[in-house]
Amino acid sequence: MTDTSIGIGAANPGAPQGKTAGKTWFGHPIQLARLFTTEAMERFGYYGMRALLTLYLAQHFLFSDTTTTGIYGGFTALVYLTPLIGGLMADRFLGSKRSVKFGAILMSIGYLTLCFGGQPAKPFAMIDGQRYEVTVRGAGEARQQFVTDAGRELKIRGNDDKSVSLVDATGAEARRVAPGKFEAGGERAPLSVFLLLIGLALVTIGNGFFKPNISTMVGALYEQGDRRRDAGFTIFYMGINLGSLFSQILCPILAVGMFGWGGLGWWAGFALAAAGMVVSWLLIQFDGGRLDGIGDRPADAPANRDLLIYGGAILAIPVVWFLFTNLMSYVRPEAGSGIIGYFLGLPIMGKMMFGTFLVSVPGILIWARLKGSAQEFQMMLAAMVLITFNTVFWTLFEQAGSSLTLFADRNTDLSVFGWFDITAGQTQFFNALFIVLLAPLFSAMWNAMARRGMEPTIPIKFAIALMSVGAGFLFLVWGAQFADASFKVGLWWLAGLYLIHSIAELCISPVGLSMITKLSIARIVGLMMGVWFLSIAVAQYVAGIVAQFASVETVGGQVTNLKVSLDTYVGVFTTIAEVSIALGVLLLILSLPLKKWMHGVK
């Protein structure tokens, strides 16, 4: 489970005092239990919402795959970008505890706002420039869609050549629509779309205040040099994955049902996510004095800026809403437009992220060359190379919430040994489950290898991670050869992909932040942390763009031809695998000079 913001809190030389001083929880300060539970419930809300989001956009609002994955990528990108501002506000003015409380409130309201999606969008189709209303009958596998043409009700059927046939009651083709001449759409209530984007904006901004500062509070539990610190963050990380594991099972059940039950509706899944977030706020707001002295306002911070900061956060909501609406209007440039044409055609968010990243990386390296020693420059160069490869890794890994979820919905047999079916959104829980099971084993393995002097270097771990994420996609592509007559792949092929991806995550995620702090010039370590999080934000955004290449034609949220859908996903996943493995091999080759440039950093 991706959560690379943990572990950034600075150690506090003045460790916790008061009535809880001296008490421990598994050998750690007793306050860790409260922060562990607070974070677990916050992640319960976030990952429960994330398990629903892509399907909600595609099936309730009937957005195209391009729009759906674009919104998802933009949202997750901002989730990783806003903590830079939220962390700064806490360090300078609010303190971590106030920031966490404020963030929890905004996120709770955001999840509740998502509950007000209104009636599902009404599907329609544009055929040769003329609009036709679409009628949907049946549910699940029996779901069929029709248009009425010249008084005749015609069934919509997609063809292998991407044309669309309109079939009459006898099964005869009454009309064939050439590829590109059939455009599906949905008529949505403007208020519902507005509330959707406002809800996502609230979650984004609230996350910026909550996410970095709960980690800072964990760091503040330990005195400088306390060897329990890394183990404490490991326990904290387990809370993240436990929260996400249960929410990714429960929220889809409430939303779309299970075991033959049809569920309560999307609102119920988002309401459960909101409930988890409210519990998180209650735990931090009413701590019974357990967190006294932890995450308080900095001693030299002015006390009269709180309302100004809170007001600024509220005023930022329409700004984020505008960024989302700009994403929705994005049209991918035509092939042959070139790099400059592609960049100029990007939404505002894309220009902002790519521009900042492309300027900051060489800019910092030039500064390091001019101001630092030769050794410091080499260490910074190694850090930037690894940051770039890290961006590629998360771009491909984060297909989980977008293209892989849509693949699960459309081309995966979701039956568990024939006993019952899970939902497409629930397939994301495999990653959290494997992390919980494998993290202790990997920790023990790295420690055992380190004692024998055999632990891989950081570049080699990164290379293994890249090759593994490619291997996961190849595993699923291999499984696609055994798809059934309805062009659906067995669930366990998808589970196998998540197993391999979880192994890849454990090779890269725990070492990233530590690597940055060790390789950076001390004077700009904070700036380098910013570049690290910016790289992850860019990765999330690009992940949405990559997922758009797997877009397939849908009508009323349903694919018109499952064979075309399977072929499209297989083609995109094969390309992803080839690129990932090739870059992993390249990094493996570069590991020798990188090791030299790192000057003993492990």
Image: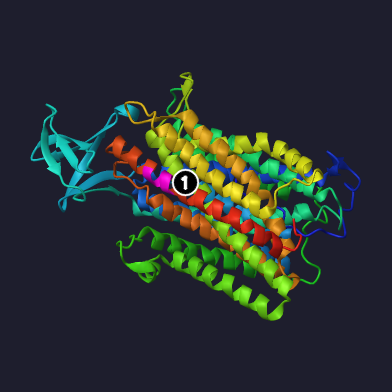
Q: Is residue 363 left or right of residue 320?
A: right
Q: Residue at x 43, y 34 (%)?
A: 478
Q: Residue at x 72, y 37 (%)?
A: 440
Say above or below: 366 vs 99. Answer: below
Q: Residue at x 57, y 46 (%)?
A: 46
Does the segment drawn in magenta span residue 573? yes
* Residue 317 pos. (x, y %): 51, 62
Residue extending farthest to the top is: 419
Depth check: give the residue in front, 551 or 128. Answer: 551
Say above or below: 80 vs 414. Answer: below
Q: Which residues are magenta?
A: 571-575
- State the SS at label 1: helix
Residue extending farthest to the right is: 22
Depth check: give the residue in front, 421 or 309. Answer: 421
Does the segment drawn in magenta span residue 271? no
* Residue 68 pos. (x, y %): 40, 50
Quarter of the rendering containing residue 337: bottom left
| Residue indicated by mark 1 | 577
In the rendered image, which quarter contains the N terminus?
top right
Q: Is residue 47 left or right of residue 325?
A: right
